[in-house]
Amino acid sequence: MDVLNELLNGFAAALTWQNLLFAFIGCLLGTVIGVLPGIGPVAGVALLIPLTLNLDAAGSIIMLCAIFYGTTYGGTITSVLLNTPGEAASAITTLDGYTMTKLGRAGVALTIAAAGSFIGGSLATAGLVIAARPLGSLGLMIGPPEFFALVVVGISLLVALAGRSMVRALISGALGLLISMVGIDPVAGAPRFTFGMERLLDGVSFVAVIVGLFGLSEILAHRPGKDKVVVQAPGMRALLPTRTDWRRSAPAFARGTGIGFGLGLIPGMTGSVSSLLSYGAEKKFSKYRRELGHGAVEGVAGPETANNAHANGALIPLFTLGIPASPTIAVLMGAFLQQGLTPGPTLFAEHADIAWTIIASLFIGNILLLVLNVPLVGLWTSILKIPYPILTGLILMFMVVGAYTINFSVFDVFVMILFGLVGLALRHLDIPLAPMVLTLVLGPLMERSLRESLDISRGDLTIFLERPVTVTLLALAALIVCSPLLKLRKPAALVADDPET
Amino acid sequence: MTSVTEARPVRRLRRSIVAGQLVLAAVGAYVLAESAGLGLWNELGPGPGFFPCVLGAALVLLSVVWFFQERAGVQAAPAAEEADGSQVRSVMLSLVVLTAALPFIGFQLGVFLFLMYHLRLRARTSWIKSVLISLCGSVGVYYLFTLGLNVSLPEAAIVPLSLIGL
């Protein structure tokens, strides 16, 4: 009953007109980012953090969460209408979604995708409600050693984000940690790697680094196609699926929710893995499996449900354990920290009202996206008709604004430009960017908690072996690090193609 | 009985990859040297230089391992698609000029000129469209942030521009 009461209180706070407006704007912006080429969810969320700077903590996170799951809805539109996934998790939807468009059933595909996303997202959020209390009660058992072990689990996940080469992933992770160490040392107060610059005493702006690495470098590396985009938005009547479409989609919705939610709980698994495995499940279990690849509605319903269930499910490790399961969630975690909230077990102990408001807003956001996406499909497709150079100019302008407004300093804009070049070089060298984001966020937390732990034990490292929770978490981290040896890796087909890694 | 000890073919490494490995190793070596001066360990455990020292050493080691992996063709980096040089130059140059000019000419004029460059000169968009979009992107965004979101953006420091509210 306690949980229900807290959730109802959360709804009361989330349903204020201000928070509804933030959720609405977040859903709109998230969908636009999902639709737009040349800007992925990681840079998109980082770029829009400045918009939330002057909002209260709950409003700010509500808006950023809405942007985050809005991107998964938006990515579907281009997959179905243009055969071009707006984001990685929607790639598999192109197989049947685009075929449905060629058969004149684009509207049905979009409606089923939106309904699946809504069902998957809402059920996964219900899972978060159920998991929040038991996992949140861990907060009372968390001291610096346990927190250190939790952060080590988070950092060990870069194994799962390695892409083609573990060595290059480790280089990326080490670079992220080094960047996070610029500035004043958190315990002794000594300046590190500041090159005598006062502006670097507070460290390098997280937003400027992420926007440069993911956003600017993506624009620099982008080679637009010469073909003009031809896209036809389906009319309102064409959006309605038949009863047969709903009946055929129902089992796919159920399977997609199970797969997406389950994999979302496992840090390091990306939404692309969920949608791919969901498609695989349809190929194995669907009554109409022979039609898959030829415009079967299950090929849209399953993967789209799975990727949204994954996006919402992946918030569980963040909210309850403070572990970011993907690069985008790492950026979201950066926004939490910027607002003075530390995601993890202590969140429910110290800021329960904010945490429940955000959880309630996830339900509301999923409804908003369902309402926004399908009827406004004409608007989303018109964005795709904007010539790429115009989009580039506007996106660059927002990058400048985003980097500047974090500290109101042009220095941060130069940092963003520098990291744009670094990102381009890393892409050229095939060094994955995802591990860097993870360590950039978690690095300072790891160092601080380790040194606080050793302060408690007066330098005795056995403190980490005396507490059961710490030992269990460190063992889990060791298992994750060794997982490539146990062949517990993501499907090989995804390793090279997954932009999230 | 014959034993065959055939040497594995040594791959010819791309220059850019070797340059990248050298830069990473140099960064690692610099961090290693710098962190030694920060204090590595004290009676309460690791000092400010401990973590950077470990990371610097790791970076050097990983760069060396990567070099040998590339030579042996193990998990080698695929040939990357070259970025469009003119796009990289024009985007970077325009961003640097805009950023340097922002404190002097302010956000509105700076971004207006920046967008005009990208829309009119690079994208060959019509004059009317370019001016309208640039006005929305500069003056519109300025007022959206300063009045709507209460987030201030740079204003011109040069006297004639600051006097007319730019």
Image: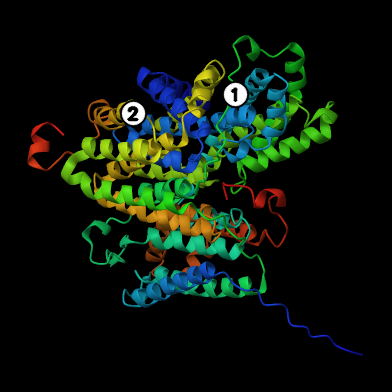
Quarter of the image that includes the C terminus of chain B? top left
Which residue sits furthest top?
Answer: A237
Q: Is residue A39 left or right of residue A116?
A: left
Subunit ID for the residue under disc 1 = A
Amino acid type at circle 2 is: Ile
Helix, strand or loop status at disc 1: helix
Asked whether, in this view, residue A453 is left or right of residue A240, the answer is: left
Up-down: is A2 above or below A443? above
- Residue B100, position in %: x, y? 23, 50
Where, by quadrant of the figure, is residue A265 drawn?
A: top right
A337 up-or-down from A152: above or below: above
Q: Position of residue B1 (x, y in %)?
A: 92, 90
Front residue (pair A468, A103): A103
B24 relative position to A500: left or right? left
Q: Is residue B133 above or below residue A194?
A: above
Whole-number angstrom distance, CA of label 2 to CA of label 1 = 35 Å
Residue of label 1:
A118
Residue B133's disc is 2
The residue most toward the right is B1
Front in this rendered view, residue A309 or A151: A309
Query: Could you say where residue A272 lies in the image, as x and y percent from the top left?
Result: 64, 41
- Tell me if residue B154 can be seen: no
Residue type highlighted by circle 1: Phe
Q: Residue at x 17, y 42 (%)?
A: B105
Q: Indicate the secondary structure of the residue bearing disc 2.
A: helix
* Chain letter of the residue carrying label 2: B
